[in-house]
Amino acid sequence: MLSPITNTPVVVVTGIRRAGLNLLACMLRAGGIPDERIVLAPDPHIPAPVRANVATGKPVHCVGIYVDRSTTSLVRSTERHNAEEARPELSLCERRALQRRFAHDLKRARDAAVERFAPLYSFAFENVIEDPTEEAKRLKHILRDCDPQFSTIAAALAVRRIFRLQPRETRAPFRVVKP
């Protein structure tokens, strides 16, 4: 999809629900991508309603970003959500069934996204949380042609703010200067 305002590619963030699509969208927004150029597509196997630029009728160009998350993490996220809504705790059998369903949904969503977007860039939710700065640098590299002003610092800070993460310690050599 092309943004009707700027004629630049639209960034489609896809994956399954609870995988971290909103987190990546927040990174994109914080990095400087306008809202009208970010599309959340939580179910990539469902056909997208827009396949052409309405003004020109030409096929639209998208940058596809797939957000992956481990099934264990998805189950934990679901359990936290259930606890917030005062729902009963999942039994072991229900957890296993949910994990199998998530595994099936992840494979189906990944296959659909691969068919729809070429190339498709994959981001693991766990990596974004572990090292947001590195993942923001990956985003900048992916978007370098259509958004050269993308801010990796702002994108990484958005993740740190959402998850209240402390800045990562860096151990660099230093020297003591005596007056």
Image: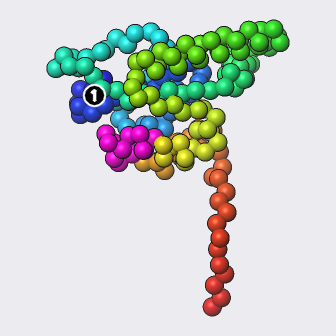
Report if residue 146 lies within the magenta region: yes
Residue 174 image point, x, y percent? 64, 74
Q: Name the residue rendered at 77%, 12% in the picture.
A: 96
Report if residue 67 lies within the magenta region: no
What's drawn in magenta, residue-wise? 139-150
SS state under label 1: loop
Reply above or below: 72 against 97.
Answer: below
Q: Name the residue rendered at 61%, 45% in the picture.
A: 131
Which image quarter is the N terminus in?
Answer: top left
Reply above or below: 143 against 76.
Answer: below
Q: Is residue 46 found left or right of 9 in the rendered image?
A: right
- Type of the residue with mark 1: Ser
> Does the rendering let one see residue 22?
no
Residue 61 image point, x, y percent? 30, 26
Q: Residues within 10 Å of mark 1 (few under 14, many from 20)?
A: some
Residue 8 image point, x, y percent? 27, 33
Q: Name the residue rendered at 51%, 31% in the picture.
A: 122
Residue receiving disc 1? 3
Q: Nearer the viewer, residue 77 or 101?
A: 101
> Does the rendering let one see residue 99?
yes
